Image (cartoon, rainbow, N blue to C red):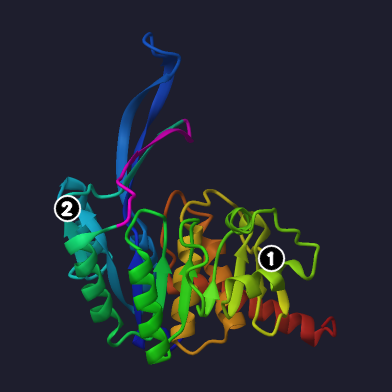
Amino acid sequence: MARMPSCRVAVIGDVMLDRYLIGETERLSPEAPVPVVKIRDSRVSLGGAGNVGANVTTTGATCHLVGLIGDDDHAVTIKAELAAARLDATRLVTSPSRPTTTKTRVIARGQQVVRIDQEVDHLVEGEDSERLVDAMYDALADADALLLEDYNKGALTPDLIAGTLEVARHRGIPVVVDPKFRHFFAYAGATVFKPNRRELGAALGAAVDLTDHDALPTALDRLQVDNLLLTLGRDGMILVTKDRTITRIPSLAREVYDVSGAGDTVTAWLGTALAAGATVREAALLANYAAGVEVGKAGVATVTREEVMAIHEERHDHLGRLRRGGVI
């Protein structure tokens, strides 16, 4: 972790705004069988690639964030949140023809009542696409790692994906991909490919049998990536390395309050650790520590170096005691 603050990490993908309207409900609407929620509080946070970038900055590293926003009030809010997170917004492309991707969640009695999405998810075209490519080249000029955050909102086009992978290969930097369905098989050559179990099963056309020792190495071969990190929510993660070794990484969460944003946290810490020179297994373990902290927080949240270091030191103290006692 000591080398992380000197790293530069490019995060390219779908930038979003997460809004939370928090209130109380005591009755149903006379207009429809839905609850009436009286809003008492509200908050916003960065989502998607923006949240990945925010988590990169909390590791101490510098983040070069590339994405697309609209020319609207939500874009203004995103820029304010980026400034608060010490993230540079100069590589964000503003499109007058698309809204800023925004997810608004209404919360009552501690539960989500409804989510309202404002978005246009067709692939970016024309001048917007060209400006994204230019921003990508600028971000990768001195980056130590590349993180691709695909939420199927249109920023990551086939041309942009191919271009980023080519630059990363040329510069010899690690590439971490957080995929969605649209371009699932477009990331050949990536260093770490990080889907969840549902995404992998949908892409392969069948549920993944984790008891079959050949299933995940076979998936690795089909994806043509170096390493596969399968996230399993409360059950932790499974790492399959290019030598076909399978490592199960159990969740370290003491209390799971909210899993929103946990995948973004894993992507950020995984990629930044690789940028700092960690092995894939070391980076995955560190990312697992960070995820264990994040799911104990409400909503989409970032994780600090101090929080991850506390778990890291606790785990090493525990292992040390086991070794001294002859247990391991």
Q: Which is more toward the observer, 154 or 270?
A: 154
Residue 160 pos. (x, y %): 33, 70
Can residue 248 be seen in the rendering of this structure? no
Position of the C terminus, as image quadrant, is bottom right
Residue at the location (22% across, 71% down)? 88
Residue at the location (58% across, 82% down)? 280
Point out the tag, 2 or 1, that comes first from the N-terminus.
Answer: 2
In the rendered view, does 106 fall on the left or right side of 207? left
Residue 133 pos. (x, y %): 25, 72
User: What kind of element bears circle 1?
Assistant: loop
In the rendered view, does 209 fall on the left or right side of 194? right
In the rendered view, does 218 fall on the left or right side of 89? right
The quarter holding residue 173 reads bottom left
Whether residues under marks 2 and 1 lie with C-beta atoms below 8 angstroms apart, the answer is no
> On the image, numbered disc 2 is attached to which residue?
76
Q: Is residue 103 above or below residue 152?
A: above
**Is residue 251 one of those drawn in magenta?**
no
User: What kind of element bears circle 2?
Assistant: helix
Q: Residues within 10 Å of mark 2 (few under 14, many from 20)?
A: some
Residue at the location (21% across, 75% down)? 134
> On the image, numbered disc 1 is attached to which residue?
250
Q: Nearer the viewer, mark 2 or mark 1?
A: 2
**Is residue 114 one of those drawn in magenta?**
yes
Q: Which is more toward the observer, 216 or 222?
A: 222
In the rendered view, does 26 fall on the left or right side of 71? right
Q: Which is more toward the observer, 194 or 300?
A: 194
Range shown magenta = 109-123
Q: Is residue 48 above or below residue 325?
A: above
Q: Which is more toward the observer, 256 or 272?
A: 272
Q: Residue type at mark 2? A: Val
